[in-house]
Image (spheres, grey):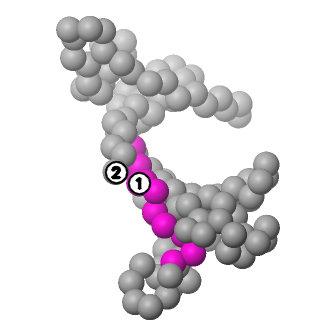
């Protein structure tokens, strides 16, 4: 099976308001079948002290979860120079991350959370095209 992935940002024209609800209605009007809900959660962490750990420690770390697709898995993407390293682990990785990167107490965290993004929406089937449409919330 061939797969292609694109991400489009929907922006409203001046004076108009657009929401994912309009897209959902439009897809259904085109005959698309609503299959299921989907969700992703991503958190970015930046190294607190860039000099700490030398070159062996990644500058940025992303923790990614797909609770509707693979709820028992967590993915870590470590950006190290021009190279990205991806690790797949059980969902317990969050607990391990909290232990090695404490946010309270006397120990300074190695990484600080920069932002969290949640994307939530519906999956549609239109012929041989499967589309995931959702809203993005960044904190």
Quarter of the picture containing the N terminus is top right
| Highlighted range, magenta | 109-119
Residue 107, percent from left and from top: 49, 88
Residue 4, percent from left and from top: 65, 29
Q: Is residue 64 left or right of residue 57?
A: left
Seen at 39% across and 21% down, the residue is 10
Residue 85, percent from left and from top: 74, 59
Q: Quadrant of residue 33?
A: top left
Task: State whether residue 138 appears in this view.
Answer: yes
Question: Can residue 115 be found in the magenta stretch?
Answer: yes
> How busy is the neighbourhood of tag 2: few (under 14 within 10 Å), some, or many (20 plus)?
few
Tell me the SS state at disc 2. loop
Task: State whether residue 120 appears in this view.
Answer: no
- Residue 116: mark: 1
Look at the picture and state if 88 lies above or below 53. above
Disc 2 target residue: 139
Residue 103, percent from left and from top: 42, 79
Nearest the viewer among 73 and 98 is 98
Dominant secondary structure of the residues highlighted in magenta in the image: strand
Which residue, as the protein is rendered here, is positioned at the far top? 14
CB within 8 Å, label 1 to label 2? yes
Seen at 66% across and 60% down, the residue is 59
Seen at 77% across and 54% down, the residue is 81
Q: Is residue 33 left or right of residue 44?
A: left
Nearest the viewer among 76 and 45 is 45
């Amino acid at each position: 099976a061939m797969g292609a992935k694109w991400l489009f940002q929907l922006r409203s024209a001046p004076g108009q308001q657009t929401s994912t609800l309009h897209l959902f209605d439009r897809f259904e009007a085109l005959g698309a079948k609503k299959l299921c809900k989907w969700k992703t959660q991503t958190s970015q962490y930046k190294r607190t002290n860039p000099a700490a750990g030398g070159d062996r420690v990644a500058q940025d770390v992303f923790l990614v979860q797909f609770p509707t697709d693979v709820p028992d898995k967590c993915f870590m993407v470590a950006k190290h120079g021009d190279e990205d390293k991806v690790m797949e682990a059980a969902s317990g990785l969050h607990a391990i991350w909290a232990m090695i990167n404490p946010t309270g107490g006397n120990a300074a965290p190695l990484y600080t959370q920069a932002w969290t993004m949640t994307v939530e929406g519906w999956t549609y089937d239109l012929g041989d095209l499967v589309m995931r449409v959702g809203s993005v919330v960044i904190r």
